[in-house]
Image (cartoon, helix red, strand yellow):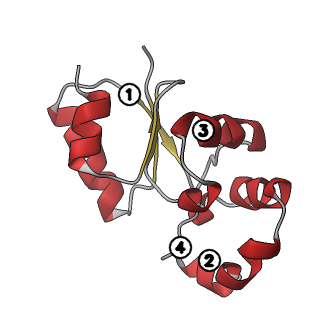
């Protein structure tokens, strides 16, 4: 099982999640979400497999989110527009995202990680 970890090296939450995975002996492939954001197709798969609403994939505390005033714009955007927006800039995506192709976690919550990624 290949696990992909989308994170941002300067993000404290990402560092905690990465350290947790390493400490638990979970092997993963690391992708810098700022340099290589998931494509629209990958995002659709992640969103569908996560069971979360698309809103949960937006980094609502990020500067980019505030600069673009997405809080006001998201409610009127179509699903396609939202996915295109996320794919256009990795800094708009809540991180880290960890996936094995079926399971998807967004952000870092130790109990969710334990339940999902501990073998």
Q: Are marks 1 and 2 in contact (CB under 8 Å)?
A: no
> Label 3 belongs to which residue?
46
Q: Nearer the viewer, mark 2 or mark 3?
A: 3
Residue at point 76%, 79% (across, down): 73
- Can residue 21 be seen here? The reply is no
What residue is rendered at 81% in x and 74% in y?
76
Q: Is residue 101 left or right of residue 67?
A: left
The answer to which of marks 4 and 3 sits earlier in the sequence is: 3
Q: Residues within 10 Å of mark 3 (few under 14, many from 20)?
A: many
Question: Would you name the residue on which mark 4 appears?
Answer: 60
Q: Are marks 1 and 4 in contact (CB under 8 Å)?
A: no
How far across and how far down the image is residue 114, in percent? 22, 35
Q: Is residue 98 above or below residue 108?
A: above
Q: Position of residue 94 (x, y in %)?
A: 50, 59
Name the residue tied to disc 1. 28
Q: Which quadrant of the figure has residue 41?
A: top right
Quadrant of image for the C terminus? top left
Q: Which mark is residue 84?
A: none
- Is tag 1's residue or tag 3's residue first in the polypeptide sequence? 1
Distance between the Cα atoms at labels 1 and 2?
28 Å
Which element is circle 3 on?
helix
Look at the numbered discs 1 and 3 and tell me whether their residues touch, using CB distance below 8 Å: no
Above-or-below relation of 70 to 78: below
At which x and y percent is residue 12?
A: 30, 63
Label 1 or label 4, whichever comes before in sequence order:
1
Quadrant into which the N terminus falls: top left
Comes first in the chain, label 2 or label 3: 3
Name which quarter of the figure residue 54 lies in: bottom right
Q: Which residue is mark 2?
A: 64
Q: CA distance from mark 1 to mark 4?
A: 26 Å
């Amino acid at each position: 099982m290949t696990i992909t970890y989308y994170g941002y090296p300067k993000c404290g939450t990402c560092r905690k999640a990465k350290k947790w995975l390493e400490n638990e002996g979970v092997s993963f492939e690391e992708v810098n979400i700022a340099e290589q954001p998931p494509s629209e197709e990958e995002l659709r798969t992640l969103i569908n497999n996560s069971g979360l609403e698309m809103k949960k994939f937006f980094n609502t505390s990020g500067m980019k989110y505030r600069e673009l005033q997405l809080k006001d714009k998201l409610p009127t955007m179509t699903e396609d527009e939202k996915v295109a927006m996320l794919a256009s800039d990795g800094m708009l995506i809540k991180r880290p995202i960890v996936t094995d192709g079926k399971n998807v976690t967004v952000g870092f919550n130790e109990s969710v990680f334990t339940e999902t990624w501990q073998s």
